[in-house]
Amino acid sequence: MSDIGRRLRQIRNARGKSLAVVAGLAGISPSYLSRLESGHRALDRRSLIMALARALDVAPTEITNVALALPGEAEEDRSLGAVRLALFAAAMHAWRGRVCGVDELTDRAEHLLEQQRQCDYALVGARLPDLIDDLHTTLAAGRDQREVLRLLVITHVQGTQAWLGDIGASQDLGWQASTLAADAAQRLGEPAYLAVSGFGTAFGLIGAGGFDLAERVLHDTHPGTAGNTELQMAGMLTLTRSLVAAAKGEQGERAAALDHADDLARHAGEGNALWFGFGPSNVGVWRMTVALEAGEHAEAVRIASTVDPNALPSPTRKSAYWREYGRALARMPNRRDEAVLMLRRAERISPARVHRHPFMHSVLSELLARARDDAIGRELRGLAYRAGLLS
């Protein structure tokens, strides 16, 4: 039984609700709910998690709070406490860093964001606390305010929030980072950076199941298309709208948003404005993720065959491609071996983006329920062990 499945059954029993009652409230069959609880089906859709949370009268995090590696078990975890304190200090206006020149801060931020793209989470975590402290201290001192505000927005969304998400840290910490980015963006007032903070805010809300709130943020954020940077940001917000639409079961809106993103990507070309890597190849990976959110696993597999992973702009995107491909194959009949191989490719690029992803424990548990004593079974059990599922 998976951690999520076990927790789901424990909550249902504690609530005194039968399989039939909870399944009916969630809009699924009792047999499907039973398979979710036993780990024979992966609970890997936001919309289904939300439906089950509503049926059980609990927060979604009560269901999805899978056990992660304890601090110190992975190198990147060692920095989590220092990053947390840096965020707290920034929120309290308790400046404790150095006043730095903008050229130094720019170099440090760009190097950190490049390492985030390269999935070097230990290095990012080690350097984040001082950079957060120094950015906020320099801003408070009145030095190069507009340049520092831009660095704060991009560092907190593409650095702090992204890093926290990739290592499986608390969503509340990620929300603090997105809030600091939003404050800086509002002070700056530039459309492209308001779009960056809007993306971060929307993702924080999606993670908490606040789809309507995320939709409102995306609707109210307008970077325009005056330049290529704005065009790429419009594309990223459009992709995020497609994910929200999939989570809400709005098929027409989902298709329209993805088609619009395709059009924007054709005009923008392969790019990396504000470290988002928006372009035609990245849209393909998002299409896979959105299809998975809608429960269309065969469609996600079909899309994967149209994407050239070598064209993806960074290791983060490549690991996402192989992970999503593996997630899709895991739900297809007789594709277990391929699923495990795809997930192993993702793990080799970025272990954290497989071990710490909120849906992967459930997917791995489903695969383990069908594991055989062969070479692929050994690969799978090794992956599950490294993800903390097996002792």
Image (cartoon, rainbow, N blue to C red):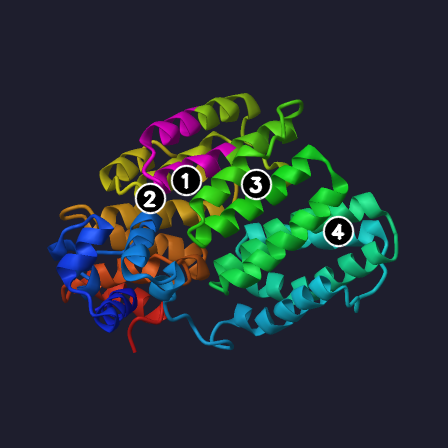
How far is disc 2 from disc 4 in space, using C-alphas? Answer: 37 Å
Name which of mark 4 and mark 3 comes first in the sequence: 4
| Label 2: element kind | helix
| Label 1: element kind | helix
Q: Which mark is residue 243?
A: 1
- Closer mark to the observer between disc 4 and disc 3: 3
Name which of mark 4 and mark 1 comes first in the sequence: 4
Task: Check the image and report above or below for 356 versus 307.
Answer: below
Task: Check the image and report above or below for 382 versus 204.
Answer: below
Give the residues drawn in magenta, as a range.
238-259
Counting from the top left corner in percent of width and height, residue 41 is at 20, 56
How far is disc 2 from disc 3 in space, using C-alphas? Answer: 21 Å
- Tell me which residue sits at (52%, 56%) in the image: 119
- Closer mark to the observer between disc 4 and disc 1: 1
| Label 3: element kind | loop
Asked if disc 2 and disc 1 are in contact, CB closer than 8 Å, the reply is yes
